[in-house]
Amino acid sequence: MGIFNFFKSQFIEVIEWTDQNTNTMVYRFPVQNNEIKMGASLIVRESQVAVFVNEGEIADVFTPGHHVLYTQNLPVLTKLKSWKTGFNSPFKAEVYFVNTKQFINQKWGTSNPIMMRDADFGMIRLRGYGIYSYRVSDAVRFLKELFGTNSSYDTSSIENHLKKMILSGLTDLFAESQIPALDLAMYYDELSIQGREKMKERFAEFGFDITSLYIENLSLPKEVEEAMDKRTTMGVLGNMNTYTQYQAAEAIREAARNEGGGMAATGAGIGAGAAIGNAMAGAFTANQQTASSAEPEKKACPHCQAQIKTTAKFCPECGNSVQEKKVPCVNCHTEIKEGAKFCGECGAKQVTEKKCTGCGAINGPAAKFCGDCGEGLDG
């Protein structure tokens, strides 16, 4: 009876794996030198795949469910071992359980800064970090490419390699995007999606599917951040002259509060007050100069004497035209101001009126005949 129990214990009747470690990717069922009983139960849980290996060659793959092992559902193994139909003897084979669940919260980060060119700051060094998740999508390829003959395999075995793959792809993505450093925070989601798409093909080479990738932070060097802070401060301050006046007023108020210190403090206060006064005077003068330089030049309207812009064509007060009328010179015909007594080009005296020699009537300077008697005026 004891000998019978000994031989019976060598036949495996139930094959299953209960995952006790959340990071385990592959588990080899401990067959050792035992044989699997034909008709044994194979239990594959959700997020698992069972793979039978015969003498180093991958045979049959089982998805989640309860499977009773017969030659009918072991076609590849049956062919490899050349079993006859209805073969019921125990057999030897290696059984591997592959974990197909998502491995989440895997971290990536830059060990060395990423050098890239920026339109605002020139060459900058960019650092970043985030998380990603992946799962085994092709158990057969994963076993062939990575697992080998180990008894178990977890995420730490491939972690460094995947991290370097991600950093290589993201470095290329950041450089190609040409997004200004000041605007990077606006594109975390877009860059994360593009980075995941870029990594899909690389992960698939090992039988993996990258299910998510997130950029948590992209940071710039300290000197660039300080420059950005200064730019932000300048934008908040706005008018520097107004800010100077405010600072001077604050300094005067603080000096007035200083009641102690004797003559030395008094002298220091006078000196400080003089310096503050000069600063305020300079600020006010700069404001006045800015205001005066901003005012447009003006002239008097020839009709109502109101002050109007030099570029105005009509007076906003009386509505009359303020443009000077031009008339041709009586000698050289150059246009000159109406009412001018002499021409600025030839110096000829301008005739302002013509008197008719026949009837004595007064006519305009351009008249050729007398308006009263019709006598010719040019003669």
Image: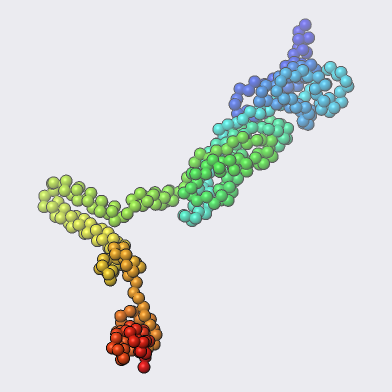
Q: At 29% from the left edge and 64% from the top edge, which residue is drawn?
A: 318
Q: Quadrant of the C terminus?
A: bottom left
Picture quadrant where residue 14 is located: top right
* Image quarter in which the N terminus is found: top right
- Which residue is rendered at x = 83% and y = 17% of the image? 89
Task: Please state the horizontal and vertical placement of residue 136, each as a whole percent of the image.
Answer: 66, 32
* Nearer to me, 53 or 201: 201
The one nearer the camera, 218 or 14, is 218
At x 71%, y 31%, the residue is 139
Query: Does residue 144 appear left or right of residue 133 in this picture?
Result: right
Can you name the residue that lies furthest to the right here?
84
355 up-or-down from 121: above or below? below
Towards the viewer: 139 or 28: 139
Could one spot residue 198 in this view of the protein?
Answer: yes
Q: Is residue 363 left or right of residue 39?
A: left
- Can the viewer see residue 28 in this picture? no
Tell me if 333 is positioned left or right of 20 in this view. left
> Where residue 214 sits: x, y (%)?
55, 38
Q: How is the image coloured?
A: rainbow
Q: Position of residue 324 (x, y in %)?
A: 34, 74
